Image (cartoon, rainbow, N blue to C red):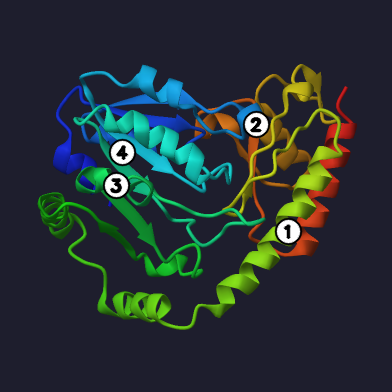
Amino acid sequence: MLFNAFLATLNPGDEVIIPAPYWVSYPDMVRLGQGEPVIIEGAPERGYKITPEQLEAAITPKTKWFLFNSPSNPTGAGYSRTELKALTDVLMKHPHVWIMSDDMYEHLAYDGFEFCTPAEVEPALYERTLTCNGVSKAYAMTGWRIGYAGGPEHLIAAMRKIQSQSTTNPCSISQWAAVEALNGPQEFLGEWVEVFKRRRNLVVEALNAVEGITCPTPEGAFYVYPTINGLLGKTSAGGRKIDTDEDFATALLEETGVAVVFGAAFGLSPAFRISYATSDEALTEACKRIAAFCGALR
């Protein structure tokens, strides 16, 4: 959906503002659509969220889109209504900028965090907002490959035309399964959120107990994105020098069997991503191995 929108709207040299850390595909989607990604870094001390001042500074006459994802993959960071309103106030001053809102983790929010989306917070942006969602995450339907988008009619028509010439269409079985997921009982979502929250707390507590790692507590999704500034320059028990987060992830996998994704892939280093969409037992064991690996660094 996002890529189709870029193909339908971008001209060579058009800019797309992307907060980092970002989902790995975002910049490449922009480049394939002949656009230029403009990256804004959300600092760990701000929960990986950008400021209105950063957004304002990044907007130019060439800016076509602002790509927004909350709660986020890879950090789980979620913008409060107040924080998002500050961003939409900036966008209101720039009528040539469209907003693409990736709401995939809408239902996975913790500790009373209230999910909100740009067109909801600022209805005046409705006519230049594309809202994207899907059933892969909240409904655990990753294999069904169903996503959906809402936006201005002319934009959706252009996206539909591109979609029909690229992958033809989603199969009818997947479509009806998605209809049942969206229209069926939703009570299980509350149960799942509580399970994910417990796993989030487990991982955050375990990682923050490791010297050299700092793990912010995310508002949503099912990822944590800890920084490893305190581990750089050290050498693993297996003899690998840890100069980057990619070195860290590689050594961790080779020496402990724990797989994480290094932060450079998401546009912000030094850090790594863990998904806690797995069992408590697997997470506990993984965190023990990470702690042992880090404890052996010299």
Q: From the image, tell me which residue sits under label 2.
A: 271
Of pointers 4 and 3, the one earlier in the residue sequence = 3
C-alpha separation, residue under disc 3 versus residue under disc 1: 30 Å
- Callout 3: helix, strand or loop? helix
Q: Pinpoint residue 287: horizontal percent, then vertical percent.
A: 80, 48
**In contact (CB < 8 Å): disc 4 and disc 3:** yes
* C-alpha distance separating marks 2 and 4: 23 Å
Mark before the other along the chain sequence, 3 or 2:
3
Q: Name the residue located 24 percent from the left edge and 32 percent from the top edge.
A: 97
Of circles 1 and 4, which is in front?
1
Residue at mark 3: 2
Comes first in the chain, label 3 or label 1: 3
Disc ID at residue 199 = 1
Residue 273 at x, y percent in the picture? 63, 41
The residue that mark 4 highlights is 29
Distance between mark 1 and mark 4 Cα atoms = 32 Å
Secondary structure, mark 4, is helix
Task: Give the alpha-carbon distance from disc 3 to disc 2, as whole Å.
Answer: 26 Å
Residue shown at the point (69%, 66%) measured from the top left: 195
- Labels 2 and 4: the sequence-earlier one: 4
Contact, CB < 8 Å: mark 3 with mark 1?
A: no
The three-letter code of the residue at mark 2 reads: Ala
Q: Whole-percent x and y of residue 69?
A: 44, 44
Which circle's residue, 1 or 2, is located before the other in the chain? 1
